[in-house]
Image (cartoon, grey):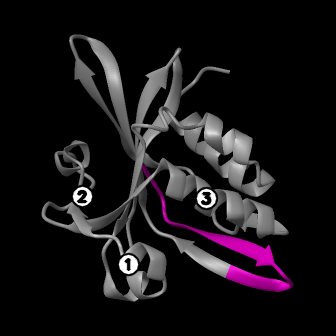
């Protein structure tokens, strides 16, 4: 199957639903270059004590120049080790992870940036969704608001380079 940014999002969904940390790892372009950003909002950050202790940063310039985000917003930034730890723990401790609403690239929200005639980067915004997580006999429903992924190709395969969670 041909690699597309939309297919990478589908594989990300499968990694969650299969609770497959190896599949998740294989979707990352470069662990050393990876960053994820969580939009600063009081309601959201109050529930995430560890993240809210991190300094607020301006968004990576790759996202600021696109049609998906308003400028001058602040975010908490996580590197690969933090993001890997979060996902590893969630996958390990969860009995089930299911998307209650479709999780995919939103129609018309894949933007390719072209340089010298070659595609070097894709920006992908996903539609809002919901995810149910079962763990320890409890169910949680998590709103997955619009997420934005910057992707690069590695050996002809689109992979996640940067990731933004909007709240």
* Residue density around tag 3, few if under 14, some if 14–19, many if 20 or more, within 10 Å: few
Residue occupying image coordinates x 33% and y 22%: 120
**Does 55 appear above or below 18?**
below
Distance (Cα) linking label 1 and label 3: 17 Å
Residue 51 painted magenta: no
Q: Is residue 91 left or right of residue 34?
A: right
Q: Earlier in the sequence, mark 1 or mark 3?
A: 1
First-in-chain label (3 vs 2): 2
What is the CA distance from the residue labelled 2 to the residue labelled 1? 21 Å
> Which quadrant does the N terminus fall into?
top right
For this rendering, which residue is in front, 75 or 146?
A: 75
Q: Contact (CB < 8 A) between labels 1 and 3? A: no
Local SS, label 2: loop
Residue at the location (33% across, 87% down)? 42
For disc 1, the marked residue is 52
| Residue 5 percent coordinates (x, y) | 49, 34
Say whether residue 107 is visible.
yes
Q: Assess disc 2: are there few (<14), some (14-19) or many (≥20) residues with their C-alpha within 10 Å of its C-alpha.
A: some
For the stretch drawn in magenta, the main secondary structure is strand
Q: Mark 2 against mark 1, which lies toward the viewer? A: 1
Which badge, 2 or 1, comes first in the chain's sequence? 1
Q: Where residue 166 sits: x, y (%)?
A: 38, 67
The residue shown at (62%, 46%) is: 12
Name the disc covering residue 69, or none: 2
Q: Kindly tell me whether residue 103 is visible in this rendering.
A: no
In the image, 108 versus 135, the foreground residue is: 135
Pick out the residue farthest to the top.
Answer: 117
Q: Which residues are magenta?
A: 125-140
Above or below, 52 against 108 in this view is: below
Q: Is residue 135 in the magenta section?
A: yes
Residue matched to label 3: 85
């Amino acid at each position: 199957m041909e690699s597309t940014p939309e297919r990478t999002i589908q594989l990300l969904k499968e990694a969650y639903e299969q609770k497959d940390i190896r599949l998740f790892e294989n979707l990352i372009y470069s662990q050393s270059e990876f960053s994820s950003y969580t939009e600063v909002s009081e309601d959201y950050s109050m529930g995430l004590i560890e993240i809210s202790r991190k300094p607020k940063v301006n968004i990576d310039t790759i996202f600021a120049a696109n049609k998906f985000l308003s400028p001058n917003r602040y975010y908490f930034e996580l590197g690969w080790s933090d993001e890997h730890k979060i996902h590893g723990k969630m996958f390990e401790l969860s009995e089930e992870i299911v998307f209650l609403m479709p999780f995919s690239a939103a129609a018309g929200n894949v933007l390719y940036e072209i340089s010298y005639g070659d595609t070097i980067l894709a920006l992908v915004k996903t539609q809002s969704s919901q995810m149910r997580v079962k763990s320890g006999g409890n169910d949680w429903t998590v709103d997955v608001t619009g997420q934005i992924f910057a992707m690069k190709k590695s050996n002809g395969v689109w992979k996640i380079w940067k990731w933004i969670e909007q709240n």
